[in-house]
Image: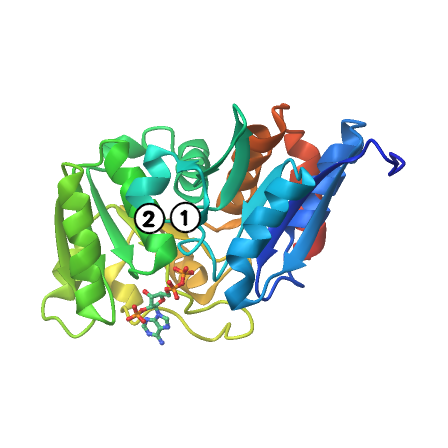
Amino acid sequence: MVKINAQSQVYIILGNPIAHSLSPAMYNAAFNSLKLNCLYMASQVEEGQLQAAIQGIKALGIRGGNVTVPFKEKVIPYLDGITEEARHIGAVNTLYWERGKLWGTNTDGPGFLCALEKEEPNYRDYNHALILGAGGAARAIVVSLALAGIKNITIINRKREKALELAAKAHTLGCMASALDWNEGGLEEVFRGRGLIINTTSLGMNPQEDKMPPLNPLWLGPQHLVVDIIYKPSMTLLLSSASKRGCRTMNGIGMLLEQGILAFEKWSGYKAPVEVMKRELERWLE
Ligand code: ATR
């Protein structure tokens, strides 16, 4: 265990609530395994205090870290710059210093792509992706899929306006994108025609494990790769239903890990100890 002393470098995650964040455990395990004199802390920031918190990061010489709900969008005006990916996604989850300036980037979408690529190296061959949900996570994933060259994206959301807005964003990145809601006719055909299905809604997340997006499992078959970005539980009702229909499935643990690896490498400059971080996450998710 590295001793904390006057030379320790401090990293931080800002959010509200933050007490259940897995990040401190994952990153402190990484620091320890690399024998770095670093410390990663969580800070619950009140709504009106975000600008002050960012000024605090600068004033106190905090070395970087992360931002989570509900500040991923709101933090942008207080940063010195953001990356192109973060600009397209419209949200930041990672803070790092570059030439004396505090920058923000987004590793959620790229982390998703890394996890997907490990599961399916040829994921670009799925030239049509179907996204369930149109919230913050969907936005990160749609932007990253579009930037990776996926040409067709269909988005289904309860509130159709949000799906339309996200489809418009995908359009600006060169994608053919369409927006539907769950009451639309012909959803069966839509599902049958898309190989890659990604659930970004919270339906099925602990503690509501008996829920899933309102699709008929009979629409699924062996041609589908069904991804659920939920990591707790690791096997959601959607994934178990898909698996029974012969689909390949992937849960959200890979995305959680990969976004963490990318963030760690960005703000620390060190190569992430992947196995250590993975073990720590799995221990917390047990
Ligand atoms: P995140 O940042 O995790 O994406 P979010 O931005 O709150 O969270 O998005 C949650 C997503 O789950 C949205 O797409 C939401 O649909 P609406 O935009 O129509 O609200 C979807 N969602 C949550 N509960 C739902 C439910 N009971 N039925 C259908 N969709 C639901």
Disc 2, disc 1: CB below 8 Å? Answer: yes
Q: Is residue 115 left or right of residue 134?
A: right
Tell me the quadrant of ligand 1.
bottom left
Residue 231 position, x and y percent, is 53, 56
Residue 1 sits in which quadrant? top right
Residue 92: percent from left, percent from top? 43, 46
Question: 119 and 82: which one is in front?
Answer: 82
Among the 4 quarters of the image, the one containing residue 184: bottom left
- The residue at the point 14 percent across, 41 percent down is 172
Q: Is residue 122 visible?
A: yes
Task: Establish if 167 lies above or below 97.
Answer: below
Please state which of residues 264 and 120 is positioned toward the viewer in this rendering.
264
- Residue that label 2 marks: 90
Residue found 33% across the figure and 48% down from its top: 90
Q: Which mark is residue 216?
A: none
Q: Is residue 40 left or right of residue 118?
A: right
Closer-to-camera residue (49/248): 49
Distance from disc 2 to disc 1, alpha carbons, whole Å, reads: 8 Å
> Please, is residue 68 above or below residue 216 in the view?
above
* 137 shown above or below 19: above
Q: Is residue 262 left or right of residue 273?
A: left
Residue identified by numbered label 1 = 76
Frontmost of labels 2 and 1 is 1
Badge 2 crowding class, 10 Å Cα cut-off, few under 14, some 14 to 19, many 20 or more, is some
The amino acid on which the numbered mark 1 sits, given as a three-letter code, is Ile
Where's residue 159, x and y in %?
23, 71
- On the image, the x and y values in percent for residue 59 come to 64, 42
Q: Earlier in the sequence, mark 2 or mark 1?
A: 1
Name the residue type under label 2. Gly
Residue 199 in view, yes or no:
no
Q: Secondary structure at mark 2?
A: loop
Mark 1 surroundings: few (<14), some (14-19) or many (≥20) residues within 10 A: many
